[in-house]
Image: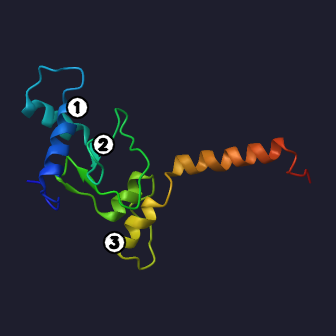
Amino acid sequence: MLFGVPATDRVKDLLDCIVAQKGRDGDVNLSAQKACQKVKSQDVFVDISQSHLRPTFTDSKGFLPTMTTSSLYYSFRSDSMLAPIEYLMLQGHSHESKLASLSPAEVRTLAGEGMSLPSLGVAIWTWFVLINAKGMVEDS
């Protein structure tokens, strides 16, 4: 059905390739229908703005690579494109997050310029460890 998805041959082919790769992972004898059901049950997300040479999709643990401002995510489970607020949810933000009158395009750009919350936490912790190791933090 591909609800809200640009129905170009490139996008359809990219989605077929992801089903073949993710759905048949470890079982090359699996039928196309069973492979598609497997991908839907895992709720694989695919960035359809990427090319076949750089396919971006959820890994075996359900994590996505870095999001960009041009990312366009498709969900196999819902058979539709993700809403911009769902981009933030993929990064660990709550669905109850309040956004000050931002348009959907601005929310998507915000998500593409951001970092997932665990990554942000590691970056801050690493920064603190480094400045502490250099003696830049004074004891009170």
Please name whichever residue, 33 or 109, is drawn nearer the observer in this view of the structure. Answer: 109
In the rendered structure, are the residues bearing label 1 and label 2 in contact, judged by CB atoms less than 8 Å apart?
yes
Q: Check disc 3 and report its element: helix, strand or loop.
A: helix
Q: Badge 3 is on which residue?
A: 104
Q: Badge 2 is on which residue?
A: 55
Please name whichever residue, 110 or 117, is drawn nearer the observer in this view of the structure. Answer: 110
Q: Amino acid at mark 3?
A: Pro
Please name whichever residue, 74 or 40, is drawn nearer the observer in this view of the structure. Answer: 74
Q: Badge 1 is on which residue?
A: 21
Q: Amino acid at mark 2?
A: Pro
Question: In front of the other: label 1 or label 3?
Answer: 1
CA separation in Å, label 1 and label 3 = 31 Å
Q: Residue at point 76% right, 44% down? A: 130
Of the residues under marks 1 and 2, which one precedes in the sequence?
1
Q: Residue 117's x, y, as percent? A: 52, 51
Q: Residue at point 11% right, 19% down? A: 29
Q: Check disc 1 and report its element: helix, strand or loop.
A: helix
Residue 53 is left or right of residue 120, and the answer is left
CA separation in Å, label 2 and label 3 = 24 Å
